[in-house]
Each structure stands twice: as C-alpha cells, then as structure tokens.
Amino acid sequence: MVASLVIRGLLVGLVAGLLAFGFAKTFGEPAVGVAIEFESAHDAAEREAQIKNGITPAPEEPEIFSRAVQSGIGLLTGLLAVGAGIGGLFGVLFAFANGRMENLGPGATSTLLSLYGLWSVYVIPALKYPPNPPAIGEPETIALRTGVYFLLMAISIAAVIGALMLRKRLAAKFGSWTGSAYAFVVYLVVIGLFMVLLPEINEVPENFPAVTLWQFRMASLGIQTILWVSIGLMFGWLMEHRAPRTAASAHSRAAVTS
C-alpha cells in the first residue's frame, strides 16, 4: 500500500517539477542573470584593484557548466529531482495522515498536508533566512548558513506536528475552536522563541539591486508553492478517483462471497 502511494507521489512530483521549471524559467532566471552579472562585475573590479596595487589576482576558476546549461537542462533536472523527492516523501506522509485528520476525505487530506509541508518546510525557515541569489553570501559562512537553515526547518516541522497533536488533545477538552486557538498560540510562541534565539545572517551587499533581490525571493516562493500545492492537488485527485473503485471492488468481493 505504502509502495503504491510512493509511486504515485513520484509521478505527481515529476509533473510538479516540470510545472515549477516553467515558472522558474519565466520568472526566476531573469533575476538570477542580473545577480550573476552583478557578481561578475564585482569580481572584475576587485581583480582590477588588485592589479593596480601590484597584487597578482588568483586565477579564475574554470566554468564547469555554461550559463545556458545551468538555466536549461540543469535547472530542469534539479527541479524534477526535487519534485520527485518531495512527491515520494509526500506519499509516505499521506499513508500516515489519511484517515487521521478528523473526517477529511483523501483529497482534502492531501491538499491540507501539502499546505502544512509548504508552511513548515519552506515558509517558516525563509522568514528567518530568506533565499538569496548568486553574489550574496560569503564562502566562509556557508557551513553556518546551511546548518542554521536546516535546524530551523527541523524545528518548524516538529512544531507543526506538535501543534497538531496538542490541538487534538485540547479540542477534546475545550472544544474544536478553543483547542485550535490554544494550540496555535503555543505554536507561535515556540517558533517565535527559536526565531529570536537563532543567529542573524545578513550578507546582502549594500549596492545590490533591491528589485532583483525581491524578484528572486518571490520567484523562489512561487517555485516552492507550485511544487507543494500541485503535488497536493494532483495526489488528492488520484486518491479521490481511486477510492470509488476500491470501494466498488470491495463491495463486489463481498457480494461474491455471500
């Protein structure tokens, strides 16, 4: 059963990755191109200053993949891999969540699960550590930036799961609305606490175009939204159309047995 759900997740993930590629190519790549031009101009100015000061600049690193390859087949391959990965994981999560989210059907469960995933995996970490285009970030801080980002992601996922479990307990005691409100307040306190405790990282150059930065971050949000929401909707559609056939098959087997 779980294996079939994972296969469905992989398939819808590939489709979602293809949709995300179309969005990224249209709205994300222009900002990336501007950022790369900014970085190239900055490096050229730095090399020129070193030469004027009698310093031999370090040799430029060879370009392994051309810009055309990176923005074409490279971007497509990456998003297909990410989409398939999210989709496969989504199938496993759906296997545990289906039938445990009150009286929601497969379609509603799948859609809500995708929204929880988008919120906890991307939105919350991005509020503290927003995605940045090329030319932003120091090589010396890569390990720190990567570590705190994934730490906040893990905290965010755990907080969402904990809040849902707490809501279920509080709803039984105080009612659905009041229990949900209490659980949400606890969730906000936990997330807010870690937002304050985790270190700030701000490495955006002062002269970096603000519009380009905004466009890149909005494109990143759009890509993640397309991935998660399209996976949730397509997976839910598949499960909704599978459910009647499963029920009919079970009814037929019962009739033959009787």
Image (tube, grey):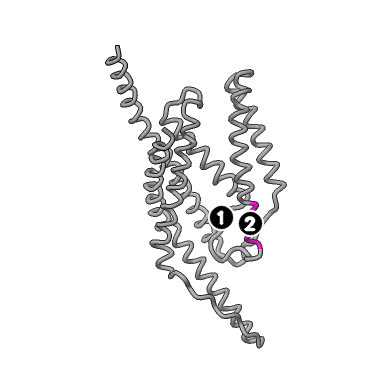
* Residue ID for mark 1: 131
Question: Is residue 57 toward the left or the right of residue 110 in the image?
Answer: right
**Which quadrant: the N terminus?**
top left
Residue 71 lies, in percent from the top left, at 42, 63
- The disc at residue 176 is none
Q: Is residue 103 magenta?
A: no
Question: Magenta segment range?
Answer: 141-148
- The disc at residue 145 is 2
Question: Is residue 229 toward the left or the right of residue 60 in the image?
Answer: left
Q: Residue furthest right?
A: 197
Say what amino acid the circle numbered 1 marks: Pro
- Residue name at image x 41 percent, y 36 percent: 5
**Which quadrant: the C terminus?**
top left
Residue 21: quadrant of the picture:
bottom left
Element under disc 1: loop
- Residue name at image x 58 percent, y 30 percent: 164
Residue 91 lies, in percent from the top left, at 44, 38
Q: Residue furthest top?
A: 258
Question: Number of labelled discs?
Answer: 2
- Residue name at image x 64 percent, y 53 percent: 147
